[in-house]
Image (cartoon, rainbow, N blue to C red):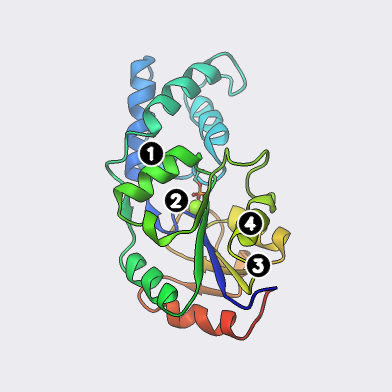
Amino acid sequence: MSDVPALLFDLDGTLIDSIPAIHAMVNAVMADLGYPALGMVQVRGFVGRGVPHLIRQVLEAQGEDPEGPMFARVETALMARYLYDVEGNTPYPGVSQALSALAARGCRLGVCTNKPHGPAIAALTHVGLLDHFEVVLGGDSLPSRKPDPAMVHHAHDRLGGGPLLYVGDSEVDAETAANAGAAFALYTEGYRHAPIEALPHRFAFSDWRGFADLALPHLLAGETG
Ligand SMILES: O=C(O)COP(=O)(O)O
Ligand SMILES: [Mg+2]
């Protein structure tokens, strides 16, 4: 096994604040289908488990059957826009600098997101972060999505299999890391529902400035779990 440290990052609520973009897109899609707008905080609660979950939650909030015929109509309309509706995605302050600092220390970097792969690439390109990553896996890249650990195992292999830190913002991420046997760093300013102490984590942080200094000791010590 390589001793080159690997870091895998969740995307929405971890590297980028994507809620303004997703909220606007969801409301635009639903308005076209004749439904009223949902609030930003409400939509934020639907993000982190991938598009099918998002759609089911939106339909339920609109009083529709989440498993009914509207699902396919919303999915088609949403996926048609998801590649292009990138306005409203913003990296959290200090993310790019933290990723550069980690790369300068020899770390290999990847993304594991439940956002579909195409929209994930589009959002990362829009915010200027794509070039930091050797691998980007999305919610439709493999047969399963997080919290199944397959995405983490697959991306980790692509980064050489060295000491691993998985970084995310939600209960899905804490569960994914636990399922993968990976050390977990919790970014506290994303879209989690549960309090910080309810999510098992190696360390938590609220500001990307300083993340590299917090993360490196966990990786250079050669810890993996
Ligand atoms: O649910 C989503 O599409 C976003 O998920 P992420 O937090 O895994 O990036
Ligand atoms: Mg997230």
Q: CA distance from mark 4 to mark 2?
A: 16 Å
Give SS at disc 4.
helix
Q: Secondary structure at mark 2?
A: loop
Mark 3, residue position: 161
Q: For the residue carrying disc 2, how many other residues have a C-alpha within 10 Å: few (<14), some (14-19), or many (20+)?
A: many
Nearer the viewer's eye, disc 4 or disc 1?
A: 4
Image quarter hosting the N terminus: bottom right
The residue wearing badge 4 is 152
Q: Which amino acid lies under the numbered mark 3 shown in the image of this protein? A: Gly
Q: Amino acid at mark 1?
A: Ile
Quarter of image, res 207 = bottom left
| Residue found 44% across the figure and 75% down from its top | 102
Badge 3 crowding class, 10 Å Cα cut-off, few under 14, some 14 to 19, many 20 or more, is some
The mark that comes first in sequence, 3 or 1, is: 1
**Residue 122 position within the rendered picture, expressed as x and y whole percent measured from the top left:** 37, 42
Circles 1, 2 touching at the beta carbon (< 8 Å): yes
Ligand 1: does it lie within 8 Å of the C-beta at label 2?
yes
Point out the tag, 3 or 2, that comes first from the N-terminus.
2
Q: Which residue is mark 2?
A: 12
**What residue is rendered at 68% in x and 74% in y?**
224
Quadrant in which the C terminus appears: bottom right
Q: Give the residue at mark 1.
A: 22
Question: In the rendered image, which quarter is residue 43 located in?
Answer: top left
